[in-house]
Image (cartoon, rainbow, N blue to C red):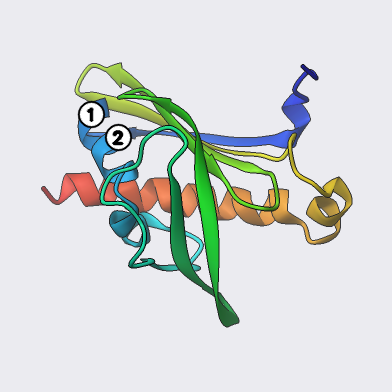
Amino acid sequence: MPTSDPNKVVSETRFVTATPQEIFNMLADPAQHRLIDGSGSVQNANASSPVRLSFGTKFGMDMKIGVKYKITNEVVEFNEPNQIAWRHFGGHIWRYKLEAVEGGTQVTEQFDWNTAKSHLMMRVMQYPVKNRRSIVATLDRLAAHFEKQ
């Protein structure tokens, strides 16, 4: 198995006032992804998406970056309630790590492009930089979502 290059993992962490299970439940429900998406690209889960994700599950999302499109993801990591990750045809992975701490959870979101099919495209399109901004916004929205409850 090839080694992972830490320079190809964009990672941010935020404290959230919810349990790992509460956060995991939200992440495992594709219909709720649009509530926390900081990129503005996630519109809705496709009608064919499951209500709850599990390892190996495929789920479709309606997206929009300028134009509308659909994308299918596959859950590639699933360790309830501590970690969930998925990837689509581009090969890169979106990962969430949840660690219980006093008063809530340390949530780490990662964009791991070690497994991306085109590292050149990742660099040229500046996805690591753009996705860091989206990750920060997503974590802010996630924290705000649970503060309201």
Q: Position of residue 30 (x, y in %)?
A: 34, 53
Q: Say if residue 18 shows up in the picture.
A: no
Name the image quarter holding residue 112. Answer: top right
Say what amino acid the circle numbered 1 marks. Gln
Q: Find the residue positioned furthest to the left.
A: 149
Q: Position of residue 136 (x, y in %)?
A: 49, 48
**Labelled pair 2, 1 in contact (Cβ < 8 Å):** yes
Q: Find the residue positioned furthest to the bottom.
A: 67
Say what amino acid the circle numbered 2 marks. Phe
Q: Find the residue positioned furthest to the right.
A: 120
Q: Position of residue 83 (x, y in %)?
A: 42, 26
Residue that appears at 31% across and 52% down:
50
Q: Position of residue 117 (x, y in %)?
A: 79, 46
| Residue designated by label 1 | 21
- The label number, if any, that marks residue 24 in the structure image: 2
| Residue placed most toward the observer, 123 or 17 | 123
Specify whether 143 is left or right of 116: left
Secondary structure at badge 1 equals helix
Q: Say if residue 25 shows up in the picture.
A: yes
Would you place residue 120 above or below residue 68 in this image? above
- The label number, if any, that marks residue 52 in the structure image: none
Specify whether 66 is left or right of 84: right
Residue that appears at 73% across and 36% down:
115
Instruction: Report, in whole angstroms, how far the alpha carbon at label 2 lies from the one at label 1.
Output: 5 Å
